[in-house]
Image: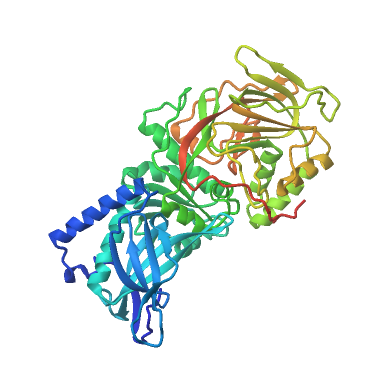
Amino acid sequence: MFEGRRRVASAADAWCEPGDGCSQRWPVSDARRKDLRAAKEMAQQGCRNSGGQQEPICRGIFEIEKRSCDVVLTPSRLEWTAIEPESPTGGDKMISQREVEFVELKEVFAVKMKRRRSVKQNKGGTVLGIAIFVCVNKGQNKLEHRVIHLSNLSEDHCNLWFKYLKDILNGLFPKRPKSLKVIINPYSHKKEAKQVYYEHVAPLFKLADIKTDVTKYEGHGFLILKECDIQEFDGVVCVGGDGTASEVARALLLRAQIDAGKDVDSNFTPVRAPLPLGIIPAGSTNILAYSVHGLKHPGTAAMHIIMGNLQEVDVCTFSSHNRLLRFGFSCMLGFGGRTLALAEKHRWMPSKERREFAVIKTLANLKSEDYELSFLPSKNTHLEKQDGKRNADGTNAEEQCNDEDKWKSVQGTFLNISIMAIPCRCSMAPRGLAPNTRLDNGSMALIAVRNCTRADFIKHLKRYDSLRNQFNFPFVETYTVQEVKIQLRIKNGWFNETTEEKADFGSHCPSVISLKGSCPWNIDGDLMEESSEVHIKIHSQLITLYGRTVEECDDPIVKCGCL
């Protein structure tokens, strides 16, 4: 994959470690083992006291970028300075040193021996040096990797440095995964998920010496995680879109409830997911990946997993009559739910055209529904609302407040209701559908759009793809909440379905839960139909994702022109 200092027509460069048929040449003595243990202890001590001058572990001469360099390895960084004669005319050659260059070891994710092998040679070969793979932040939340080549033809010298580097990396970063369960949705977005994984992600996992168990599934993520021994893995990785990511996240959480003996058909407190989840974006919509990575880039997602970057994320439970319907990160009903329901009926269309058709068709048949929203405001937050609002039909909005339990109640006709536990960023909404929401602050954004004209509603939608405030309209209300109860009102009174039969545990796993006479819900890009009262509750930091908190994008790039 990478070349050495010279090209030989009949030879091929290769990466290997001493275990690839090379360790027999270089037996490790007891003294050297003692040195390696001392290096590990120095690395751990240096990580705790990184502010001061650190004692070098080893020092040597390598060629880097065609320059002879004095290379020093410390517990927290690799430093090198170029060496060259002060006078090119001969005589006494005084050594002068240039500016010190370095790389932090926390940015290194792989170290490999560089060898030249013949075409038919699988092991061994001529030592060329050491290759160090470093994670680099390219800006705009994008992560890539680069290679630093330390060239030296001495096998003993390179083996010694290789052992020191590997021992330091293994001792400093215990959170980095060594074994992963990978779940691929082969039908995600034009069947590209498999290609995305094997071309952009699998080579990086191999470089980082991560063992993978790959499974291709067709909508049965829960059954896969239910049957496997998750204790064998350090994390779970899914490759697909929002539907795949939300299903695997639900499966992890449901598996955690089973192992903890929780009764999901009662008012229970869920336990945390046992393993972190990595999301490789490979779908038509990638809101969850975009929210924790800042962009749709499989390489960046893979680097977050390799580097062990962990982000705690809040999760919502959706329940009805104390029966768990599902776990989720966000939901929409009204316009958002009807748009998804229409798009699901036209799966035969290409994804982009299907989304635009569904949006335009739903706008053409725009209608409001009568709901009652009961919610518990988040603690220590300001309740945002505007007084004196009227619906588009001229009626007053009914607002009630129960001072005893501090629940608020809002009734009226609404075009769309959104409940977001995460910012829900995407290419069409760079700031997010709920830009003021954070991934792990223990609160949800409740966004209620009251009945208004079609023109005003379109103006509201168009502001999502710009830096202008999409909530600065008299018909839009926003609240920061901990719990929400949503009840659909019909002409003859409240719809209250109390004769539902209890479903078995597997009924919580399908992407569509259908009840007769219900309204469509868009939950993490999946369609759920529910007509009775739905109770949504936030649970702080219930799952861990590979990624980090993403700063808001200052230069949004709009990729949707359907409006």
> Looking at the picture, does residue 538 appear above or below residue 300?
above
Residue 96 falls in image quadrant: bottom left
Q: Position of residue 129 (x, y in %)?
A: 32, 73
Left or right position of 505 against 558: left
Q: Position of residue 551 (x, y in %)?
A: 59, 47
> Looking at the picture, does residue 305 appear above or below residue 272?
below
Residue positioned 84% across, 37% down in the render? 453
Which residue is the extreme one toward the right? 394
Q: Position of residue 441 (x, y in %)?
A: 54, 34
Viewer-closest of 426 and 373: 426
> Looking at the picture, does residue 457 appear above or below residue 164?
above
Left or right position of 25 against 466: left
Residue positioned 35% across, 56% down in the render? 210
Viewer-closest of 458 and 71: 71
Which residue is the extreme one toward the top? 404
Q: In which quarter of the image is the N terminus?
A: bottom left
Residue 404 falls in image quadrant: top right
